[in-house]
Image: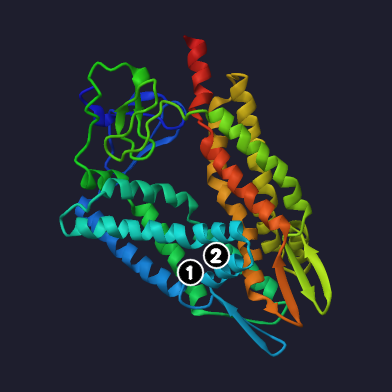
Amino acid sequence: MSENTSIITCHDCGLLQKISHLPEDGAVACTRCDAILRKLEHVKAAVNIEYLLILVITALVLFIIANSFPIIELHVAGHEVKTSLYGVVHYLFTHSDYFLGGLVFLTAFGGPLIQLSGLLYILLPLKLNFIPPFAPQVYRIVRMITAWSMLEVLMLGLIVSLVKLSAMGTVIPSIALWTFLVLIFFIAAILSNMNAEIIWDKISPVNRDPKLKDYESAEHITNCHNCHLLCKVTDNHEDHCPRCESPLHKRKPNSMVRCTALLIAAFVLYIPANLLPVMVVSSLGNSEGDTIMSGIIYLATSGDMLLAIIVFIASMVVPSIKLIILTLLLFTTHFKSQTNMKDRTRLYRLTELIGRWSMVDIFVTTLMAALIQIQGLAVIEVGGGAIAFGSVVILTMLSAMSFDPRLIWDNMEKVNE
């Protein structure tokens, strides 16, 4: 195992394999489940760090501008109302909607801010040729928080909100809205150009687990799920990665139990999420609840069929697909099914890919509630359906994160034994 840098265990199927050829550009896929094991770029480390640093600094400046001005201004019946992203979070907390307030803060403000500031903390000292304290731990947090940074979903929510608000009055997109749009492209550029291998090599001298011996058996070998360092793991599950200090597990502890519990909770809340109103509109003494489906129907009947389809897919199709897929994965894994294992692994990847887009309705509801508070004319309040739906989104994401796709392939290996 002296060539440990070319030995890796697949994060999706657990197969231990040796990479015999590392291309200068391109990706290396698992020979069993086609998961991407490594992406490589023919780029000098110094150039990559400098380019990323420019992108991160620019993105942080855009982030500050986007949160310093109102996102949308609305002129209706002689009234002028406007709100910023901070205003949305402040409205939710002052109206005791702590769950939705925390959710919007994490996904639209806290997550991106931690992601960008963490990268700046690492990249700027690297450009100056020194490693900042606790760099591996900070980069570990950056990689973990990325899944909860949802500015692209927020942008879609803003577009839907603009369409709905245009029926109430004159909508004026502000500088913050356009800045958010540009910011999304910069964050996408950062993620697509961030070479984790280069950064880990730069911030940590550890490139091998000292406990890993050349004669180690395969059942005691795994890759750190965060930094992908090849490590030795024991049966007591008390090991930590020597590079980033993430807990090491051959398989996620209690994966099936935790995934099942979270999925059952999501199923239970899925019913009120679709039956209860996500927002309540009070106008001239009349109150009317607006469910997810009624909002989609409104978009369709008002001539915005494309947006209606997008919201229908994000708010109705995506949660249903995730619930069905996770149920299928749990049942087939529990009964040790040996059929279509590669396809089932692809379905698992799909749940990770699409889950975040269900947040669209939450952003639309909270933004409109924070904006439309015109006493005597129109007031929008967050309904119980929004809390239930936000819970479904989070529970399905956590359920997918709890499921270990390697269990699908473990059944095959046990049969072959």
**Residue 395: where, in percent of width, then height?**
60, 44
Element assignment for label 1: helix
Q: Is residue 281 above or below residue 337?
A: below
Give me the disc on residue 155: 2
Measuring 56% from the left and 57% from the top, which residue is drawn there? Answer: 103
Is residue 9 toward the left or the right of residue 23 in the image?
right
Q: Residue at point 66% right, 64% down?
A: 365
Distance from disc 1 to disc 2, alpha carbons, whole Å, reads 7 Å
The one nearer the camera, 133 or 318, is 133
Instruction: Look at mark 1 in the image and give the residue it sits on.
Output: 180
Q: Does 187 appear above or below 379?
A: above
The correct choice, above or below, for 86 with respect to 33 in the image is below
Q: In the image, residue 186 lies at what x, y percent?
A: 40, 63
Amino acid type, label 1: Phe
Residue 403: quarter of image? top right
Please tell me how crowded label 2 is: few (under 14), some (14-19), or many (20+) other residues with Cα within 10 Å: many
